[in-house]
Image (cartoon, rainbow, N blue to C red):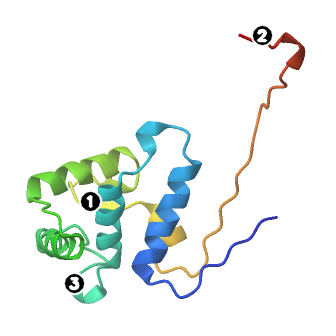
Amino acid sequence: MISKKFKGLTRREVYHRIFEILNYAQNDKETKLTTSEIRVITEFMLLSKDDKGMLYRFSLGNRKKVLELYNKRYGQILNNKNLNGILTNLRKKGLVIRDADGMNYLSPFIENKILGKEKFEVTIGFEDIMEENVNNYNER
């Protein structure tokens, strides 16, 4: 078994690292997260209870706060239209869910496996491995 411990990271760095590892494990290009998507979901994950972060994490007030933090932290201009597009992509990728009332929430995977956790485990497996027939290799 291979084990890797990361020490001295901020919570933001931990979340970034987790999403980078998950991206690496994705074999479908459509489910991989872009840098902007990782940054946005991380900012929403970092909202505190004082920001109504637990129940109304994706409220209009919190969206404005995330836009402000994102633009300040990354020196890029993210507007409300871009943010809505990123949130749509995160829903398509299963990291944000929308209930029947139209409210957005973090997926149960993020809530239960990542948010606030000190340990995140990844298991990578291989199935249906095909053997190569090296005798049929044609040199060009």
Please state the horizontal and vertical placement of residue 36, each as a whole percent of the image. 29, 57
Q: Which mark is residue 51?
A: 3
Q: Residues within 10 Å of mark 3 (few under 14, many from 20)?
A: some
Q: Residues within 10 Å of mark 1 (few under 14, many from 20)?
A: some
Q: CA distance from mark 1 to mark 2?
A: 54 Å
Looking at the rendered structure, the secondary structure element under dot 3 is helix
Looking at the rendered structure, the secondary structure element under dot 1 is strand
**Residue 11 visible at all:** yes
From this view, report whether residue 44 is shown above or below residue 139: below
* Residue located 40% across and 56% down the image: 95
What amino acid is at disc 3? Answer: Asp
Q: Which mark is residue 63?
A: none
The C terminus lies in quadrant: top right
Q: Give the labeled residue for mark 2.
A: 138
Of residues 40 and 54, the one nearer the viewer is: 40
What amino acid is at disc 2? Answer: Asn
From this view, report whether residue 98 is shown above or below residue 131: below
* Residue located 34% across and 44% down the image: 92
The N terminus lies in quadrant: bottom right
Q: CA distance from mark 2 to mark 3?
A: 63 Å
Q: Residue furthest front?
A: 140
Q: CA distance from mark 3 to mark 1?
A: 15 Å
